[in-house]
Amino acid sequence: MVALVVAGHGQTPRRGTLKHPIIDSRMTGQEVFDGLDPKCPDEIRKRQKLVTVKYYSTDGRVHQGQLVIDEELVSDIKKVFALALLERFPIYSVIPISDKRFRKENRWDDELSMEANNTSAFNYREVTGGGRLSNHAYGRAVDINTFLNPYIKGDIILPHGATYDPKVEGTFTAESPVVREFLRLGWAWGGTWTSPRDYQHFEKPPKK
Ligand SMILES: [Zn+2]
């Protein structure tokens, strides 16, 4: 009891501030590729950069997470997260998909990350439904607040159990400052697509 009282008198710094963020992810440059699909070509993997970002989470505290993205898009991502921080737009967590909690049979599992409302970018995988590589496979797409901003195609809503309700904080609409900032930087937003409609998804494919 005594120890608790002492801590309450401010002897330890308050966590969840810009100076002392709550750490959601602290992986090494090697750990972020643990469990990567062995089919991923070296030239793609070598382009991926580990970016540290700060954000207000849904608890109103500042958190620190990490994102893996193509080297060409690092400055865009930093600008978007700086704006989200300024606007106090809540981002639930930003943890690379190689984290143990997002593994199924030791492979990266997008559904587990989406169900956890997690934000992530690089993932060497096909588009949802299959057929071709996703822009995530090149580190050129990011999914944000995935449970609040589902992927919708006909009757299919992913992650399972999610609903799209623009009134809930952390949900994207065309008016969201984060969406506008992505568009300003030349990214596309899946929330404007018709089928699928992919509210969580932002991408910037390479220029042809
Ligand atoms: Zn996506």
Image: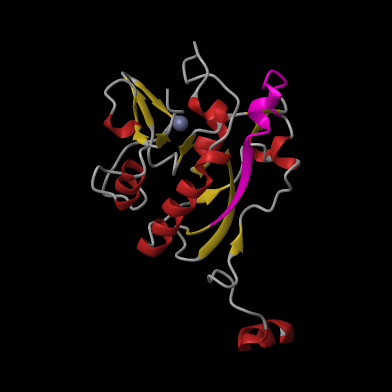
Q: From the viewer's side, name the closer residue of 87 and 79.
A: 79
- How far across and down, in percent of the image, does residue 108 sit? 64, 29
- How far across and down, in percent of the image, does residue 48 sit? 62, 37
27 magenta-colored: no
User: Looking at the image, is 57 positioned above or below residue 191?
Assistant: below
Q: Quadrant of residue 52 in the image?
A: bottom right
Q: Is residue 29 left or right of residue 159?
A: right
Q: From the viewer's side, name the closer residue of 174 and 153.
A: 174
**Count of numbered marks:** 0
Query: What residue is rendered at 66% in x and 39% in y?
Result: 101
- How far across and down, in percent of the image, does residue 137 sit? 56, 26
Instruction: Write down the region rendered in magenta.
Output: 36-53
Q: Is residue 206 left or right of residue 172?
A: right
The quadrant the N terminus occupies is: bottom right
Q: Is residue 181 left or right of residue 116?
A: left
Query: What residue is rendered at 44% in x and 65% in y?
Result: 60
The quadrant the C terminus occupies is: top left
Query: What residue is rendered at 50% in x and 36% in y?
Result: 114
User: Looking at the image, is 14 positioned above or below residue 170?
Assistant: below
51 magenta-colored: yes
Q: Identify the residue at the far top of this view.
A: 131
Q: Identify the residue at the far left of this view.
A: 175
The reply to whether residue 199 is visible in this rendering is no
